[in-house]
Image (cartoon, rainbow, N blue to C red):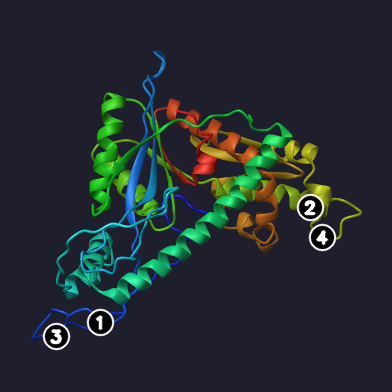
């Protein structure tokens, strides 16, 4: 699925809350069923290497991952706490105390609400069972997404677009379980500011599993960088590049006499894909960074058509097919674009899956 920076494309549950009672705003003890997950959050960072002497740029990587959630002592001995790392199931025990849920806390519908609900129902057997079920579902869907992305990366390696011997940079783990997005952003910025030394642009890359707070953290980072550090901040999305390549592929088919509709076999050859990507240029247009589409009769700026031509049905319905075979091309294009912005003094916030953002070098 497509991930748009600064926003989360995963499904969200919205609570419709009744007005609080004048007599009491405190909810009764935990009912038999509550909907949430038993997944915690962990943040990891790529430690930034020393920048070249000619630049004052800071390129820092962060990854949001699932973290083991403690299970109360009175839980059954076969209760499993789930983690989003390779070793996904571990038995653990910890004492907990129920936190009262107030109308004010629930109406916030933010990280504080989530943490309060998890703590309040920590001793509830039905909650733990539901949490395990929901956690399994999240991990399964993310595994499926990761597999599809990896297939695209493997295709890029076979075509010679990506280096098959590429080794991603090492991750540094930071546990953020129970912290607010603002706290997480402050911890990230402490690393960024220390490496940056107070000037220049940079790149912050966040990736991780569904529900680990990537979009919320990006929003908090953007606000803090703009208000506290007075930085110019750009949120980058690979989605618009996939859409641009898809528009070119569909347009190519429309111009072929033997194509009545989009034909992947004819349009998505190695030679055509190289040509389509060559029709994309990232740079400054009208005084700001943008992606320009020039070719096949098209002369467009992505910022001006991202909500029109790039979201037309003929583009949207063919994105999955095009994205599968253009992962490598888009990864390299994004890496170059992000580097240009960082070197120009802009802070770029890039959110995505680890399989692809691994290729954006610090």
Instruction: Give the distance between the C-alpha atoms of the residues marked 2 and 3, in whole angstroms.
Output: 60 Å
- Answer yes or no: is residue 284 visible: no
SS at circle 3? loop
C-beta proximity under 8 Å, tags 4 and 3: no
Q: Residue at x 59, y 34 (%)?
A: 332
Q: Is residue 5 above or below residue 343?
A: below
Task: Count neighbours of disc 1 (C-alpha within 10 A) and say few if under 14, some if 14 to 19, many if 20 or more.
Answer: few
The quadrant of the picture occupied by the C terminus is: top left
Q: Is residue 65 above or below residue 106?
A: above
Task: Count neighbours of disc 2 (C-alpha within 10 A) and say few if under 14, some if 14 to 19, many if 20 or more.
Answer: some
Q: Could you tell which of marks 4 and 3 lies nearer the N-terminus? A: 3
Q: Residue at x 53, y 55 (%)?
A: 143
Q: Could you tell which of marks 4 and 1 lies nearer the N-terminus? A: 1
C-beta proximity under 8 Å, tags 3 and 1: no
Q: Residue at x 54, y 39 (%)?
A: 290
Residue 162 percent location from the top left of the image? 64, 32
SS at circle 1? loop
Q: Could you tell which of marks 3 and 1 lies nearer the N-terminus? A: 3
Q: Which residue is mark 4?
A: 261
Q: Which circle, 2 or 1, is nearer the viewer?
A: 1
Q: Residue at x 26, y 27 (%)?
A: 194
Residue 235 placement, left or right of 329: left
Q: Which residue is mark 3?
A: 21
Instruction: Give the distance between the C-alpha atoms of the residues marked 3 and 1, in whole angstroms.
Output: 19 Å
Residue 89 percent location from the top left of the image? 39, 56
Residue 222 placement, left or right of 286: left
Instruction: Give the distance between the C-alpha atoms of the residues marked 4 and 3, in whole angstroms.
Output: 60 Å
SS at circle 2? helix
Q: Which circle, 4 or 1, is nearer the viewer?
A: 1
Q: Which residue is mark 2?
A: 264
Residue 286 placement, left or right of 107: right
């Amino acid at each position: 699925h497509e991930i748009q920076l600064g926003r989360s494309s995963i499904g969200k549950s919205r609570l419709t809350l009744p007005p609080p009672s004048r007599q009491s705003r405190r909810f009764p003890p935990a009912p038999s069923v509550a909907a949430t997950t038993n997944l915690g959050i962990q943040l990891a960072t790529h430690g930034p290497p020393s920048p070249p002497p000619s630049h004052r740029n800071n390129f820092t990587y962060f990854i949001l991952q699932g973290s083991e959630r403690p299970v109360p002592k009175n839980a059954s001995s076969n209760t499993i706490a789930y983690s989003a790392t390779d070793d996904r199931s571990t038995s653990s025990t910890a004492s907990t105390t129920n936190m009262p849920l107030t109308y004010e806390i629930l109406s916030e519908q933010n990280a504080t609400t989530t943490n309060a609900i998890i703590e309040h129902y920590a001793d509830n057997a039905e909650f733990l069972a539901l949490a395990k079920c929901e956690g399994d579902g999240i991990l399964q869907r993310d595994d499926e997404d990761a597999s599809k992305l990896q297939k695209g990366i493997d295709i890029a390696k076979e075509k010679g677009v990506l280096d098959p011997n590429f080794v991603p940079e090492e991750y540094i783990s930071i546990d953020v379980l129970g912290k607010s997005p603002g706290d997480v952003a402050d911890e990230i910025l402490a690393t960024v500011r220390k490496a940056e030394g107070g000037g220049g642009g940079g790149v912050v890359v966040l990736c991780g599993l569904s529900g680990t707070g990537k979009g919320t953290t990006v929003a908090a980072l953007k606000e803090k960088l703009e208000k506290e550090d007075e930085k110019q901040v750009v949120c980058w999305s690979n989605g618009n590049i996939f859409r641009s390549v898809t528009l070119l592929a569909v347009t190519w088919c429309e111009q072929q006499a033997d194509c009545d509709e989009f034909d992947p076999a004819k349009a998505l050859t190695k030679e055509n894909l190289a040509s389509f990507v060559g029709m994309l240029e990232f740079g400054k247009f009208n005084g700001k960074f943008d992606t320009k589409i020039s070719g096949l009769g098209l002369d467009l700026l992505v910022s001006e058509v991202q909500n029109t031509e790039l979201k037309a049905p003929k583009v949207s319905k063919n994105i999955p097919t095009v994205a599968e075979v253009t992962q490598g091309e888009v990864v390299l294009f994004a890496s170059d674009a992000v580097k240009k912005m960082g070197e120009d003094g802009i802070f770029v916030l890039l959110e995505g899956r680890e399989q692809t953002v691994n290729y954006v070098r610090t």
